[in-house]
Image (cartoon, grey):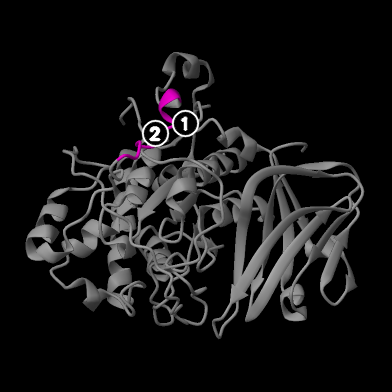
C-alpha cells in the first residue's frame, strides 16, 4: 500500500460526455461504427514500481515494434501557456486527519476466504458490457464462472454498464441502482469514451459515491485495451486508483504481452473478441486471487477529495420519467415538491434525429442542446451539458425534437445544490 503525493495531469471541468469509441450496449453484440473516435496522446514515460502500476517495458516494446505509432506528447503550441492543474493544491493526503476515522470492513476477499457467497457489480461502457463477445464468453461471464467453480460459492453479478457512455454515466447508474443489494466488489471499466478534461472529476465522484453507498465493497479499476497506449486518461485512472488504494487491472499490458497483434484480439479494433476478453478476465482474476491470499479487507477512510469540485457530486437528485407528465408528443413536464437546484444531467435514448433539446425551469430557458444522431441504431446516454447551476421551484419542461426521442426520455439528474 502506497501513501504519497498524487498529481493529476488533467484540467477538470464537467462537460458533455464524448460519444465515441465503445459505442454499443453489448447486449446484442452490435458494434458502434461511429467515426468520431478521438485518439489521446500518450503520457511521457516514467519509471514505475511493480504492483498497481503497469510495467512500462510494454510501452518500450510497442514503440520498438511499431515506430510509426510512437506517441506524441501533449505540449502547448508556441506562444500558448500551459494549462495549470487545479488539482495540485489538493494533492497531499492528510493521513493524520484520517487516522481517527480509519476502519476496516470485510469485503469480497475475506468472504471468499470463508467460503461465503458474494455479489459483484460491473460498472462500465460497452467493454464492461462485453460488446463484441459471443454469448457466454465476455470477461464478466468468465469471471462469474471462475468465482463459483474456483471458490465453490454462489456469485451474484449485476451489470449496469452502458455502451458509448463515460464515467458520469457510471456515477449516475450506481446512484440510481436501487436493488437492495450490498455489493462486495465493484469493477470500474471506463475511460475510452470519457472527455479527458472531465474524466478526473467524474471518475473520482464515481469512486466516492461507491464508497458511501457500499462501505463493505472492494473496488477494481480497469485500464481499457482500446486505448492501446498509456494515455493521459489512463494516467488519470492510475493515479486516482493509487490515491484510493484501488488495484488496477492493466489490459493494455495484457494485450501487449499476449504475443499476438492487437487486431487479432478485437472484432473492430476497439472491442475485444472472445480471446481478448480472456485477457480481461485473467487480469481481474489475478488481482482477486492475490487479494484473497492477502485476506485484504475494505478500508473505510474519509479521504480528502483530490478535486475541489467533487463534493458537488455528494448531493444527488434523480427524477425518473415516471415522475413527469407528458404534456404533448414532444414535451415532458415536472412540478417538483420542493425547490431543486444543481447541475443538470439528462438520461435519454439517442435515436435518428436532427434538432434541439430544450429545458425550461420555471418558465426560463435553462439549457438548449443541438442534437444530431445520424446512426441507424438507438442508444441510451447519460450526460451533462455544462457546469451551470440551475434551479426550479414550480416547473421543469423538457422538449425533444422528435416524438421518438421524447419516447426515449429516461430521467433528469441534479448534482450539487439543494438535496
Q: Relative to residue 210, is residue 321 drawn left or right? A: right
Say which residue appears at 38% left-offset and 63% top-offset. Answer: 38
- Residue 396 placement (x, y as % from top left): 85, 55
**Disc on res. 306:** 1
Most extreme residue toward the front is 79
Visible residue check, residue 198: yes
- Residue 352 placement (x, y as % from top left): 62, 81
- Residue 135 placement (x, y as % from top left): 43, 82
Q: Relative to residue 129, is residue 359 drawn left or right? A: right
Q: Please, what is the dominant secondary structure of the magenta stretch? A: loop
Task: Examine the structure image and report whether residue 48 is included in the region drawn in magenta.
Answer: no
Residue 348 versus residue 234 in the image, above or below = below
Image quarter hosting the N terminus = top left
Say which residue appears at 67% left-offset and 43% top-offset. Answer: 388
**SS state under label 2:** helix
Say which residue appears at 16% left-offset and 61% top-offset. Answer: 257
The magenta span reads: 79-89
**Disc on res. 243:** 2
Task: Examine the structure image and report whether residue 80 is included in the region drawn in magenta.
Answer: yes
Q: Quadrant of residue 84?
A: top left
Q: Residues within 10 Å of mark 2 (few under 14, many from 20)?
A: many
Residue 379 versus residue 382 in the image, above or below = below
Q: CA distance from mark 1 to mark 2?
A: 9 Å
**SS state under label 1:** loop
Amino acid at each position: 500500500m502506497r501513501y504519497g503525493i498524487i498529481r493529476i495531469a488533467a484540467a477538470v471541468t464537467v462537460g458533455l460526455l464524448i460519444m465515441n469509441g465503445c459505442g454499443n450496449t453489448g447486449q446484442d453484440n452490435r458494434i458502434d461504427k461511429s467515426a468520431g473516435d478521438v485518439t489521446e496522446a500518450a503520457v511521457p514515460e516514467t519509471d514505475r514500481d511493480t504492483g498497481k502500476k503497469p510495467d512500462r517495458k510494454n510501452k518500450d516494446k510497442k514503440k520498438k515494434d511499431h515506430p510509426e505509432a510512437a506517441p506524441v506528447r501533449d505540449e502547448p503550441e508556441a506562444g500558448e501557456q500551459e494549462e495549470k492543474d487545479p488539482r495540485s493544491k489538493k494533492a497531499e493526503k492528510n493521513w493524520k486527519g484520517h487516522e481517527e476515522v480509519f476502519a476496516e470492513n470485510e469485503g469480497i476477499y475475506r468472504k471468499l476466504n470463508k467460503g461465503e457467497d458474494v455479489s459483484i457489480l460491473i460498472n462500465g461502457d460497452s467493454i464492461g458490457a462485453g460488446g463484441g463477445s459471443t454469448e457466454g464468453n465476455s470477461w464478466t461471464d468468465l469471471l462469474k464462472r471462475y468465482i463459483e467453480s474456483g471458490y465453490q460459492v454462489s456469485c451474484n453479478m449485476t451489470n449496469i454498464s452502458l455502451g458509448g457512455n463515460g464515467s458520469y454515466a457510471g456515477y449516475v447508474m450506481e446512484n440510481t441502482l436501487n436493488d437492495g443489494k450490498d455489493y462486495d466488489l465493484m469493477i470500474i471499466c471506463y475511460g475510452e469514451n470519457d472527455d479527458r478534461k472531465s474524466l478526473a472529476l467524474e471518475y473520482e465522484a464515481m469512486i466516492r459515491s461507491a464508497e458511501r453507498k457500499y462501505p463493505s465493497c472492494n473496488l477494481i479499476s480497469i485500464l481499457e485495451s482500446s486505448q492501446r497506449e498509456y494515455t493521459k486518461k489512463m494516467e488519470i485512472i492510475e493515479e486516482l486508483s493509487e490515491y484510493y488504494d484501488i488495484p488496477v487491472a492493466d489490459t493494455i499490458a495484457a494485450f501487449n504481452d499476449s504475443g499476438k497483434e492487437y487486431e487479432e484480439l478485437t472484432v473492430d479494433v476497439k472491442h475485444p473478441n472472445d480471446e481478448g476478453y480472456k485477457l480481461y478476465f485473467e487480469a481481474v482474476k489475478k488481482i482477486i486471487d492475490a487479494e484473497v491470499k492477502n485476506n485484504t479487507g475494505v478500508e473505510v477512510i474519509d479521504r480528502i477529495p483530490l478535486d475541489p469540485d467533487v463534493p458537488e457530486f455528494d448531493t444527488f437528485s434523480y427524477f425518473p420519467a415516471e415522475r413527469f407528465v407528458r404534456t404533448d408528443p414532444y414535451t415532458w413536464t415536472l412540478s417538483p415538491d420542493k425547490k431543486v437546484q444543481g447541475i443538470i444531467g439528462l438520461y435519454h435514448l439517442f435515436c435518428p434525429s436532427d434538432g434541439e433539446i430544450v429545458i425550461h425551469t420555471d418558465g426560463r430557458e435553462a439549457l438548449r442542446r443541438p442534437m444530431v444522431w445520424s446512426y441507424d441504431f438507438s442508444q441510451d446516454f447519460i450526460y451533462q451539458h455544462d457546469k451551470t447551476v440551475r434551479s426550479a421551484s414550480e416547473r421543469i419542461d423538457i422538449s425533444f425534437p422528435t416524438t421518438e426521442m421524447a419516447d426515449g426520455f429516461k430521467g433528469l439528474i441534479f448534482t450539487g445544490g439543494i438535496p
